[in-house]
Amino acid sequence: MNKNITVDNLKEYSKKLMFTMKEEEYSTLKDEFDILLKQVELIDKVPGIKDYEPMSFPFPLEGAYLREDKPIDSISREDAFSNCKDVKDECVSVPKVVA
Amino acid sequence: MIKDKSIDEIRDILKTNKVEDVFEEAKVMAKEANDEYNPFVTIMDKCEHINSISKIDGVPYALKDNFSTKGILTTGSSNILKDYVPCFDSTVYKKLKEAGAVLVGKTVLDELAMGGTGLTGHTGIVRNPYDKSRITAGSSAGSAAAVALGIVPFAIGSDTGDSVRKPAAYTGVVGFKPTYGRISRYGMFPFASSLDHVGIFARNVKDIATVTDVLKGRDDKDMVTLPDENINYSENLDSSLKDVKLFYIKEVIESTSKDNEVIVNFKKLVEDLRSKGASVSEVSFDKTLLEVIYPTYFIISCAEATSNNSNLTGFIFGPRSEGATPDEVMINTRSEGFAEMIKRRFVIGSYILEKENQEKLFLNAKRIRNMIVIKMNQLFKEYDGLLLPASGSIAPKIEDSSKPDRLGSEYLILENHLAIGNFGGYPSITIPSGFVNNMPIAVNLTCAQKEDLKTLQIANNIEKVIGGDK
């Protein structure tokens, strides 16, 4: 685990997440990372932590099952496109990537 | 006519008044309140009402703006969805509509429900009805304020860490999140799916029970929903405090000064409950675990949020920024659409989910969650419920919350213990317990998983002991 987070690291993370941040925002974020990593040390030191399984849900899910593979709810093409800013020929249109 | 009224009182008013007139009064109040307190993103123009025989037929209500409403703007209080109009209904909205409830407006939240102050919604800050210079807490800020201002008798929120129960405490209303899966989250914008619950605000416990009766039940569109137990909560609220065994956590109470008026109020309630026949025991809980509640919550929620919000690209829905390539369009859309706090959480979430960090960060946080839940489940075998102050103070001043939701270096156990309710999916309810400096304070009751009826029954008794039957 990289414990020495730099602003350049943070820029790389935000790039992967497909957004940019202002320079001063990276500084705030770096401060927050420093605190987070200190708190992670606290978590790491909790006695017996490795004896426990990671918990993903509060309790076993009774209602989770694979339903029949049949369409039950669908929306119309018109509804699906109703919030899309650029639709052409029944497709979502985006800038060309090939000339 | 309807200001500050409960569901039953409004149902009485509806015997001699039209649903449309009640709606109009609520609408006028909502518009007036928005100038001063800003609880609403959208206020409905027209009364839309389906006749029903339910107990909330004709009753006005408010809905947090992270629940999908077909044909009605649903923004998540974020610029990235500022013009989004869903093409489907959330299950909660659908059930309320079919039960005859009348939507007055969609309420402001902290952006995408990721915050605890009510200061980060894209339409501005929500102010506390008791003191405009103070926060309401969040993220369900507008829903709490709408009930506290007496505009509606109930409102819907969502609760991932304490987002219904903390604002309820700061605004002097009842706030309840039932057991994980008791109410369907279909159509509710996901924040951290393993912690997300639907929650309800109302003026009293009975109204909370009435609305829960309408909303609860299995929904195949949300795989975590529980089968309905076919028990009507609101008609089975009467119970005795005799033989009820409650406990509080010594280390939480001792984390602040014993002269803190919130603690004085809490201890008086404990004595009053004992005098009515309940037993209230002091129980010791590993302080090391209590101190890591917030970082555990923070790590799990940031990780899940990063994943859940990756669909906000600007291509299929929401505003789309200009760009020469699809990548540029997406980067510009997300850069302009998310506020700073959201971006910080996503970066942290992304870091947590990196392969080399998962064991030490994500999985260890999930182990702590398990440790806390196992300990709580053991306690709930011996006790009926955990009683604690909902917060260690009255609502803070807005200027003291001006750096909202940054991870702090202090371990504020008394401010963060409500997340235990989300870790274990426990039914958990905040009940107003008095005032300090003319600001409301509250207690919180948390019970064992799936014991929603018991939670409401005990809460109903606590409310009577406090004298809160508003």
Image (cartoon, rainbow, N blue to C red):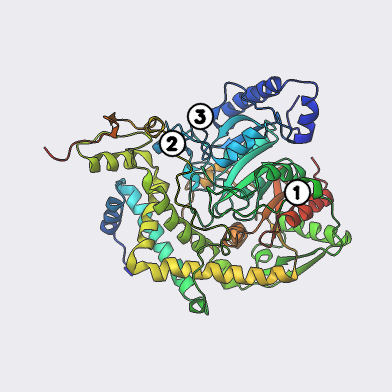
Q: Residue B135, position in %: x, y?
A: 58, 42
Task: Tell me the residue at 80%/45% (across/down).
Answer: B468
Report the number of numbered marks. 3
Q: Which residue is mark 1?
A: B233
Secondary element at tag 1: loop
Left or right, A83 with reference to B243: left
Residues at discs 1 and 2 both on one chain = no
What chain does badge 3 belong to?
A: B
Secondary element at tag 3: loop
Q: Tell me if mark 1 has few (under 14), some (14-19) or many (20+) residues whose alpha carbon lies within 10 angstroms of its own.
A: many
Q: Mark 3 or mark 1: name the one nearer the start of the chain.
A: 3
Question: How far is disc 2 from disc 3 in space, using C-alphas?
Answer: 17 Å
Residues at discs 3 and 1 both on one chain = yes
Give the mark toward the camera: 2 or 3. Answer: 2
Residue type indicated by callout 1: Tyr
Which quarter of the image is occupied by the N terminus of chain B?
A: top right
Left or right, B272 with reference to B65: right
Vertical side of B179 occupied by B67: above or below: above
Secondary element at tag 2: loop
Q: Residue B75, position in %: x, y?
A: 47, 36
Task: Tell me the residue at 55%/64% (across/down).
Answer: B293
What chain does badge 1 belong to?
A: B
Q: Quadrant of residue B5?
A: top right
Q: Which residue is mark 2?
A: A75
Question: How far is disc 1 from disc 2 in space, using C-alphas?
Answer: 35 Å
Vertical side of A95 occupied by B221: above or below: below
Vertical side of B419 occupied by B53: above or below: above
Q: Which mark is residue B414?
A: none
Q: Quadrant of residue A1?
A: bottom left
